[in-house]
Image (cartoon, coloured by chain):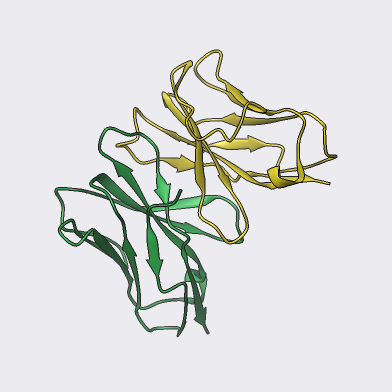
Chain colours: A green, B yellow
């Protein structure tokens, strides 16, 4: 069963705009990871944020984590057409080793 | 360095046949995972290896599915008596030590059961 729920399911924006995707989960976690997937194949790791962290940055990416609300957000600033992909959040629960994924947000960045 | 590799990239088989899918993890990574992704869904966990042993196989859907990692490196996912519902992309990932580390994914094997 899938724990995470991404919101929105689909997002379409213009190049240069910011894209925000949200993720909610149900149980306590050890860490939360965001991945990008192009064309339904391999997943590219973007950011890992641990349960004791609140915010992380990587280039144009900013991830926040609110463990009290069991939610995370991924912000992509100054989006590019190449950012078009599906984005997944995945959690690792305490005492577990496996990633539990949501259904993903399909992002389209129009040139 | 080299990432996770998977072979074949595509596999078409007939219902009832046996298939093997191979995963070559990042060198030195002790943890290896198999996931399955159906169209429009996120990946779902199948099995986790720590070294040579299957530490968690709770995601295997039934006893037609089996995986091995005999030398603690390459892993093979084996599916017996394939069914049309087994059609999916099978993803392998590895991490340095455990699930608390970043998991790096391979490109996947797309399995189609006719």
Q: Residue B41 at what x, y percent from top left?
A: 54, 57
Label count reads: 0
Left or right of A82 in this view: A34 = left
Residue A3 in the image: state x and y as whole percent: 38, 52
Q: Nearer the viewer, residue B77 or B61?
A: B61
In the rendered image, the residue lying farthest to the top is B71
**A9 or A110: nearer the eye?**
A9
**Side of B56 where B77 appears, left or right:** right
Residue at the image point whose x is 30% and y is 50% from the top:
A32
Where does the image place residue B98, in percent across and percent down from the top left?
34, 30
Would you identify the image quadrant in which residue A55 lies? bottom left
- Residue drawn 62% across the image and 58% down it: B39
Residue B69 location, x and y as percent? 55, 19
Q: Residue furthest front?
A: B62
Q: Residue visible at 19% across and 62% down?
A: A69
Q: Is residue B72 above or below residue B114?
A: above
Is A24 rendered above or below residue A101?
Answer: below
Q: Is residue B77 left or right of residue B95?
A: right
Where B77 sits versus A82, above or below?
above
Quarter residue A19 falls in: bottom left
């Amino acid at each position: 069963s899938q724990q995470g729920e991404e919101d929105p399911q689909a997002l379409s924006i213009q190049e240069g705009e910011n894209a925000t995707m949200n993720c909610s989960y149900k149980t306590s976690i050890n860490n939360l990871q965001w991945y990008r997937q192009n064309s339904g194949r391999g997943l590219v790791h973007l950011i890992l944020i641990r349960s004791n962290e609140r915010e992380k940055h990587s280039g144009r990416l900013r991830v926040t984590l609110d463990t009290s609300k069991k939610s995370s957000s991924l912000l992509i600033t100054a989006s590019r057409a190449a950012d078009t992909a599906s984005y997944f959040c995945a959690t690792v629960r305490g005492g577990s080793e496996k990633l539990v994924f949501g259904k993903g947000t399909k992002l389209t960045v129009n040139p | 360095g080299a990432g996770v590799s998977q072979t074949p990239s595509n596999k078409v088989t007939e219902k009832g046949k046996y298939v093997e899918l191979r995963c070559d993890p990042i060198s030195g990574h002790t943890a290896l995972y198999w996931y399955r992704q159906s169209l429009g869904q996120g990946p779902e966990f199948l099995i986790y290896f720590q070294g040579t042993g299957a530490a968690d196989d709770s995601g295997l859907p039934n006893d037609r599915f089996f995986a091995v990692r005999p030398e603690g490196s390459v892993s093979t996912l084996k599916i017996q008596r394939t069914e049309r519902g087994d059609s999916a992309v099978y993803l392998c990932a590895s991490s340095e030590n455990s699930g608390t580390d970043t998991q790096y994914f391979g490109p996947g094997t797309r399995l189609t059961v006719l």
